[in-house]
Amino acid sequence: MSEVSREGLRLYDSHAHLVSSDDARYPRNPFKMKPSPDGRPALRPPFGPGTIGIPGGMHGPTPVNEKPTAEQLHQWMAEENVVSIAAVQKGMIYGTDNSYIVDAADIFPDEMRAIVILDPEEEKTLPEIRAGASRGIVGVRYFPVNVDDKVAWFGSEKSVAVWALCDELGLAVDIEGPPWEGEELIPVMESMADRFPNTPIVLDHLFMPDVTKPNFGIDAIYDGYRTRPNVYLKWTSLSMDVIREQGISVPDVLRRAVDFYGADKIMWGSDIGTSSGTYKEMVQRAVDSTVLLTDEERRKVLHDTGRRVLMKWDGTD
């Protein structure tokens, strides 16, 4: 495979986690994992932090898990020609306290906009979405940690109220890619896409297809996502980790995803703050993964789609 030229290549990062260095001002209050029903230790979060060889966790002989502040990532973005990002709440550090991610995005408002994590069952959720919208958040993320019946949780009356408010305010709904039970959620996501056709629905990590299957698991089961114009998917370092751990070609999977969904529906996200590696390495991995794409497809996946959907970019700069 030939190398991809970085000359003139801009990127938009749809999935970057920021963490404050000031624990006094922004105390850490992560989700508390429930014990397993059989009394075993609590289930760990779906994707780390992990150990060598665990997708989404640390890997390599000298693993690095960077959790940047807004100021640090601002510098790295300039070095890598990343023009803007979606700053995604780090639930396994802050839970549903979105104070830092919103404040962090406000430091560089032209470059960073926040996606918050909120629980539809909490009373604070709807008022906090309205307050966040007034400060420029671009989305609300569903992060179903400790949720046993995800279908009921996503489709509950209170959840529908969250979707309706996002629709009213022009916010995206971002869905954590499930490591299991993803197929059960397909009808729920399709129903919500039909009910709120003007609301962008962004599915993290390609929604975790089983890449060991024919066509890397990206097939007719996802036709509903492919045909609904308001459903989008993120292509992340975590996605690449999972594929790598199966001994499968990363560029081949991305080529299949673009063939199936179209480059207008796929956006790159670094997953910095969770996946391992430096930001420079993550950007280079993303660029390398596009070696089988056309120049136009590469531009869309690495920049245009995410910036258009999440930042409402009009393509003029």
Image (cartoon, rainbow, N blue to C red):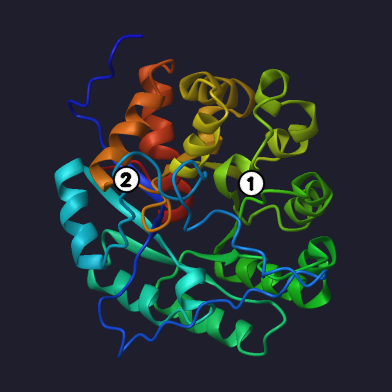
Quadrant for the C terminus in the image = top left
Res 313 visible: no
Pointer 2: residues within 10 angstroms few (<14), some, or many (20+)?
many
Quadrant for the N terminus in the image = top left
Residue appearing at x 72%, y 34% in the figure: 227
Q: Secondary structure at mark 1?
A: loop
Residue appearing at x 80%, y 32% in the figure: 221
For residue 143, above or below residue 118: above
Q: Is there CB contact under 8 Å for labels 2 and 1?
A: no
Q: Is residue 4 left or right of residue 191?
A: left
> Toward which corner of the image does residue 136 lie, by quadrant?
bottom left
> Toward which corner of the image does residue 152 lie, by quadrant?
bottom right
Residue appearing at x 32%, y 62% in the figure: 67
Residue appearing at x 73%, y 68% in the figure: 40
For residue 155, above or below residue 296: below
Identify residue type, mark 1: Asn
> Toward which corner of the image does residue 297 lie, by quadrant?
top left
In the rendered image, which residue does mark 1 sit on? 230
Residue 277 bears which disc, if any?
A: 2
Residue 101 bears which disc, if any?
A: none
Residue 313, position as x, y percentages in the image: 38, 49
Q: Nearer the viewer, residue 264 or 87?
A: 87
For residue 310, above or below residue 12: below
Q: Is residue 113 left or right of residue 78?
A: right
Q: CA distance from mark 2 to mark 1?
A: 31 Å
For residue 107, above or below residue 270: below
Q: Nearer the viewer, residue 290 or 300?
A: 290
